[in-house]
Structures are given as structure tokens and as C-alpha cells.
Amino acid sequence: MSISHAPPGSHKPDISEIPGSEATPVDLEPIVPTSSRRTRVPRWLRRTTGPLLLLALWQLLSSTGVLTADALASPGRVAQVAGDLVADGSLADAMTTSLQRVASGLLLGTLIGTGLALVSGLFRIGEDLVDAPVQMLRTVPFVGLIPLFIIWFGIGEAPKIAIITLGVTFPLYLNVYAGIRGVDAQLIEAGESLGLSRWGLVRHVILPGALPGAMTGLRYSLGIAWLALVFAEQVNADSGIGFLMVQARDFLGTDVIVVCLIVYAFFGLLADFIVRTLERLLLQWRPTFTGR
């Protein structure tokens, strides 16, 4: 079987010129990406759906008697008690006191943890002297040190702030240290080839490279700070959110306890939002996957 080729310049018949054939127009459908076919629901609505469903389930269980008032107060009762605590000013005073304690412990823990990580991460002699003791101390539960802190610092504000400081220090140390040691060696070589001094390398290469790890450590530290506050305010406290919880526990007031837990959760969510905002501002140079 031979294949004949039309000579150059010859006319190619259109399909409409062929006898017995009819030209039918072809319907073209635009290609729509799969992601654009899905119905777009506002993200704020998607993020609030879960808590709203949980709240509705809670109310349903309370209304049907599955959850008794002695076990867990209903959402309506919790809202009423929260309004009463706000009206008499006791909740605002407790929140102010707890925020001051967390802020003091977070500041001290950030300074100590970051400082130790810089010494251990930037200098080999610093790693030899600092890293091993820190790794040993971080395995000790900071809650177990409360009796010692009471003996050393008394029963005032000092042991409470010390507990929060200890809880904040180790996550920051680990993440900042890992961030420093995780900087790409090729970036260091490129900086040296450009004539950067040791301080220039630290400022322009190492610290920016360790910043993502520092932000992760800060998020962990904020979560542990509120956890440590719960234990700290059990130490002979006469004010703060934990003090309200202790009083409510003595009188089996689950409504007040739930209000305090909601305040803790709100502060934790607010702190996480602040850190996320800092990440977006400080890490604009690092594109990341944001989900689909």
C-alpha cells in the first residue's frame, strides 16, 4: 500500500465541498479549573462552623438532661454567669492579673531561651557548655518544680512568674537552636564569598534563616505559658483567673469554671493570631503552601 502526497500548492478540499457531507459546527466548552467549580464559602464562616456545632450539641445535651447542671452547666447559664462576672468587675480584674503574669513570664522566658539558643547555636564552645544542661532540664516536668520554687521564692508572685518563665524557655530554645543549625551551608558560603564578616553573616544570613523556627517556638511557648499559668495560679493565689477557678471548685460551680476555661481559650487564640500576623509580616520572603 502506497501513500500518495498532494503536490505542493494543491488545494485541500474543505469538508463542506465533499459530496454527501454536511458541515456541522462544533460546540466548544470552556475548560473550567476544578477549584473554581466549587462553591466558595467565606473562610470565616467555615472556621466558625465547628465551634457553633459544638455549642449546639452542648445545648442539646443540656436541654435533654444528658448533661446535668452538676456535671456541666448549660451554655445559657454560662453566659448568664459571665455577664454577672463582667458586671461586678471581678472577671476584668482577674484577666488583668493573669495577663500581667503571663506577660512577665513570657518576656523573661523569651530573653533566656533566645539568649541560650544564640550562644549554643552560634558558638561550638557555647554548645558544649549550654546544650547538655538545657536538654537535661527540659526533661524535668516544670510542674514538679513548684515545691522548690515555693521554697526559693516564697508564695508571692515570684514563683508564679518563675513557673511560666520555665515553661516558655525550652520551646524557644529548641526551635531557635534548630533554626540556627538548620541554615543552608551554601548560603553561608555565598555570604563569605561576598565578603561578609562574621557579624554580617549572623545578621543577614543566619538570623533571617532561623526566624521561621523562632516563630514556631514562640507559638509553642505561648500555648505552654497559658498552661503554666493554670498551675501557677494554684499556688496560694488570691487573684487571677485561676483563683476564680479554685473558688468555683470549692463550691462546685461548673458555670464559673467553664467561663474561666473560655477566657483561657480566648487568650490562647488571640495570642496565636498575633503570632500568625507577625509571621506574615516578618516572613513575607518565604512563600508557603496555604491549602486548597
Image: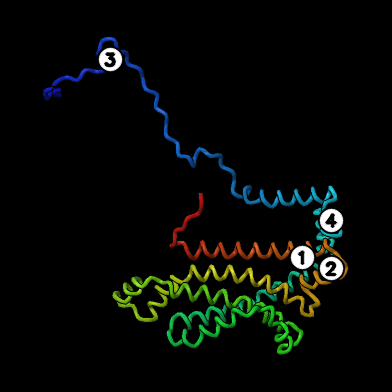
At horizontal 63% and vertical 76% (from top left) the residue drawn is 167
Q: Residues within 10 Å of mark 3 (few under 14, many from 20)?
A: few
Residue at x-position 46% and y-position 80%: 121
Q: Which one is earlier in the sequence, the residue at label 3 or at label 1?
A: 3
Label 3's element? helix
Mark 2 and mark 3 lie on one chain; the one further toward the N terminus is 3
Residue 10, by quadrant, is top left
User: Label 4: which residue?
Assistant: 77
Name the residue type under label 3: Ser
Q: Is residue 87 left or right of residue 25?
A: right
Amino acid under disc 2? Ala
The residue identified by callout 3 is 16
Disc 2: CA contacts within 10 A as few (<14), some (14-19) or many (>=20): some
Q: Which mark is residue 248?
A: 2
| Residue 236, image x, y percentages | 79, 80
SS for callout 1:
helix
As drawn, 262 above or below 172: above
Q: Quadrant of residue 218?
A: bottom right
The residue under label 1 is 260
N-term-proximal mark, 4 vs 1: 4
Q: Amino acid at mark 4?
A: Arg
Which callout, 2 or 1, points at the residue further toward the start of the chain?
A: 2
Type of colouring? rainbow
Distance from the alpha carbon under mark 2 to that under mark 3? 89 Å
